[in-house]
Amino acid sequence: MQNNDSSVPADRVPKADAYTVPHTHPATPDGAAALAGPAAAPPRIHAVVRPPLVTHRECPPPHALSSCPHADSLSPAARYAELFVDVQHSGLFADSKTFPDCIPNCDPDEIVARYREVRGTPGFSLADFVQAYFTRATVPDSHYLSDPASTLREHIDGLWPVLTREPVAHPPLSSLLPLPHRYVVPGGRFGELYYWDSYFTMEGMAGSGRGDLMVEMAQNFAYLIDTYGLVPNGTRNYYLSRSQPPVFALMVDLLEREHLASAIDFLPQLHQEYAFWMDGAQALRPGHAHRRVVCLPDGAVLNRYWDDRSWPREEAFLEDVETAMRSGRPHHLVFRDLRAAAESGWDFSSRWLDTPCGQPADLVTIRTTAVLPVDLNALLWHLETRLAVLCEQAGDAGADAYRAAAQRRETAIQQYMWDNAAGAFVDYDWCRGAQRQCLTAATVMPLYLGLAQAPQAQALAQTIAARLLDDGGLATTECTSGQQWDHPNGWAPLQWLAVRGLARYGHHDLADEIAQRWLATVASLYTHECKLVEKYRIEHVEGRAKGGGGGEYPLQDGFGWTNGIASALMAIYGAVPAKCCTDRGGS
């Protein structure tokens, strides 16, 4: 598209062939709410974004790899400053994630300087400026066509190459973090590596015989821990302030189970990830918290989700600003809780809100950092348990300390997170000193990891069958709130945790029922639409299954962990005889 902005002279517009990035297009605005003209955000928006006197922890800068182009050393909000705020506030792009993922066409400092030079000139157009100086990154091969003759298994196996990315394809000076090995992305708008998604994707790779990719994925996560001291939410520089549920130990267990690697080879990275989650625990006094650790009044230490930054998520800027401004609370506290929910992977859910179950959920009531999640603490118990075993095998003197930490955490989980009356594990509100009342599918994590006692597993199986089992599989929560991690949506990873967790304790009939209902849901939508999607509606729907709804973005096709869990379940229960029955398809 030709540039018509007189404020961006032809000799200052960057050359399109400065470098080659496949499958990209000019950053053409596509937002229905895009503002005409300069579209500078008002001062109050800039003030909300960076409130004075609010401290945050500095995040590690992106690491450079000689084998692929360097990422920008600053996140888009930090790099582009008022340009970033003006673009995101203007609504130029329909998806707030689009601009943070754009690729600069020349040196970012030059772009910022040029913006400050021309933004106040007559006739300046923000849309034209962005289109001249940025390239839009698109998902490679996003229109994958399914062969109508392909079974569901064949379709999934054919998608692994489509969703695989090569490090050499990384664009320079963008927000995309470099990685040393190949990796699999979820699909759709999620064109980078994500942490907890990848574990469930890797379970499916095992079912598809893709051990090569599984090893490379694990090596990438080990690299991230070695480089940054954590596994970030995803491989974008704006994700470096938070992680996701700590499943690296489960990845390592998976590699060992499949005879692809020895868990002890990853002991240094397991040490480091544990240190990240427990930072500050040694100095905590009862009733106090630091980052991701909370010391309860009796001295028990449990964990919460957190984020080291307290301004809007760069990939959801406009949404976060609107939420904060409606909240009536200090804006930085709202931003922190929104970000912490993103670290949980359950963004968003009634789990983190004060809205009573059954009423429309409003994100202004979000209190993520006040909640001690049962699934997070079960995962850290598992990490402590595995570290104790691996340290003992390695002759490491730390084995006893990890074993003692696991025992203390198990005691605290049993005390604070087991609801005997409900027959379920629940989250705990440490600020109010009370258990959370909304039953969620996170209750199955202690089953999956072997933390539950046999009588608890029996009670929990009855609770799941009575309250969370739906026509299409396991419900995410009992609450219909409009948020995507609530009823009526079902998610692949939660099905896997429930199926394998129940089977671990001998509740095979219920495990089989959940698995069969979920596979029927996935197969039904594949049969009619020739694709797999991010989430599904699991309540009864006449005719055929439908994709889930809610959330901050449209339903995504692909999709990494759906493919993975369908593959893993079919490896256990047998292939599903589903074929695409339309004359068009795509995932």
Image (cartoon, rainbow, N blue to C red):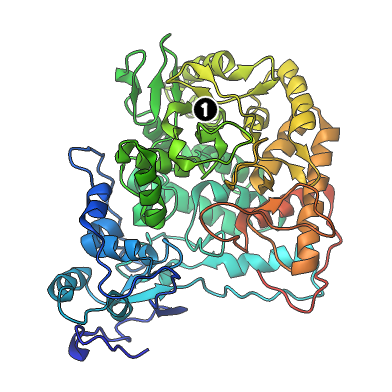
Residue where numbered disc 1 is placed: 377
Where is residue 152? Give x, y as percent: 78, 63
Which residue of the protein is positioned furthest toward the left in this rendering? 117
Taking the image as shown, residue 217 lies to the left or right of residue 540, namely left
Residue 109 appears in the rendering:
yes
Residue found 81% across the figure and 47% down from its top: 517
Taking the image as shown, residue 1 lies to the left or right of residue 109, namely right
Q: Quadrant of the C terminus?
A: bottom right
- Which of these two is toward me, 303 or 436? 436
Q: Is residue 413 above or below residue 144?
A: above
Which residue of the protein is positioned furthest toward the top in this rendering? 298
Where is residue 229? Give x, y as percent: 35, 42
Count all numbered tags in the image, as a single digit. Answer: 1
Kind of residue sitting beneath label 1: Asn
**Label 1 residue SS:** helix
Where is residue 387? Give x, y as percent: 49, 28
